[in-house]
Image (cartoon, helix red, strand yellow):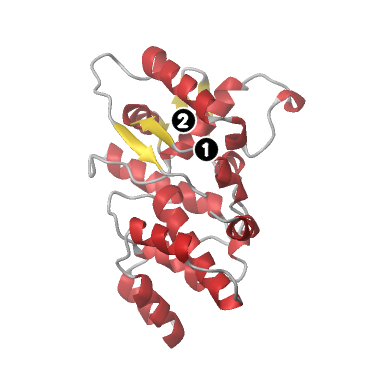
Amino acid sequence: MAEEKKAIVRDLGFGGLMHVPPLRVDHQLLRELANNFKLGENKLKTGYGSFQITPKTIGDALGINATGNLFPEKVEYKQLYKQLSDDDKIIYRRFQGKTLKSLTDEMMEIGVGSEEERLMFKRIFILYIQMAFLLPTTINKISPVHLAPIFKMDGISERNWGAHVLTFLIKGITDYQDKKKKAIDGCLFALMIIYFHLSENKGKKRAERPPKPWIANWTKEKLVERMTAEKEEILVSKHNMLLLFYLPECC
């Protein structure tokens, strides 16, 4: 991504996500994290103790805002469309049904020379980062929950993204634990970073802990080393099959 676009991403409040490396993550490790997430308490039960997962924890891990106004928890296409102005309905139709690949292509190709282009780039990036990372689903098309934020771009960086990510993740884990879905919607990568960071720094004084965002302290090599250790020694039994997925580079 061009430097001018990276500057816009930082202005949107997502500069911390530039630290996320392209990485293959063990699906079974993510499933174990979901299995050990205590619904109702929002606690991750681990061999290192229980870790409370809050919007602030998500924000600290990924470097996204975790205060301010909340996004709607549930959005339906018809309800969303009725509330839009005529101009916003044009934008709605422009993105409805878009895939992650088409968004990625648009994000890389669009210019940012004019104010109108910069605003469109921001909208495309907000959609992209939700679909690819913050609010991923098993369906490879934009959903209403992804679309809703782009119609209120004023103050978008001050919205509570930490709560947005956590609410969506809890829903995904709930559906998984209730056996409504075999796959898990939501940013399990954030849960993994929280687990790695808090377990590694448990018992350390504040001055001894690495700075925020926590993801900045986890290089690709360090993540691979820790994931390998978890797979072999803690979370994955010898009977589990190894499944991999590709985490795209965010920015």
The correct choice, above or below, for 245 with respect to 250 in the image is above
Q: Which residue is mark 2?
A: 44
The correct choice, above or below, for 106 with respect to 178 in the image is below
Question: In this rendering, would 165 be left or right of 137?
Answer: right
| Comes first in the chain, label 1 or label 2 | 2
| Crowd rating for badge 2 (residues with CA inside 10 Å; few <14, some 14–19, many 20+) | many
Three-letter amino acid code at the position of disc 2? Leu
* Residue shown at the point (39%, 32%) measured from the top left: 25
Question: In this rendering, would 136 be left or right of 163?
Answer: left
Of helix, strand and loop, which one carries label 2? strand
Q: CA distance from mark 1 to mark 2?
A: 7 Å
Give the label on residue 86, or none.
none
| Crowd rating for badge 1 (residues with CA inside 10 Å; few <14, some 14–19, many 20+) | some
Front-lying residue, 212 or 45: 212
The correct choice, above or below, for 249 with respect to 244 in the image is below
* Residue shown at the point (61%, 36%) measured from the top left: 216
Q: Would residue 110 be visible to someone looking at this image?
A: yes
Q: How many marks?
A: 2
Most extreme residue toward the right is: 207
Of helix, strand and loop, which one carries label 1? loop
The spot of residue 123 in percent (x, y) is 49, 67
* Residue shown at the point (53%, 33%) measured from the top left: 194
Front-lying residue, 132 or 77: 132
The spot of residue 140 in percent (x, y) is 29, 55
The spot of residue 83 in percent (x, y) is 42, 80
Instruction: Please say if the residues under marks 1 and 2 sit with CB atoms less than 8 Å apart.
Output: yes
Give the label on residue 53, or none.
1
The spot of residue 122 in percent (x, y) is 53, 65
Q: Would residue 41 be visible to someone looking at this image?
A: no
Three-letter amino acid code at the position of disc 1? Ile
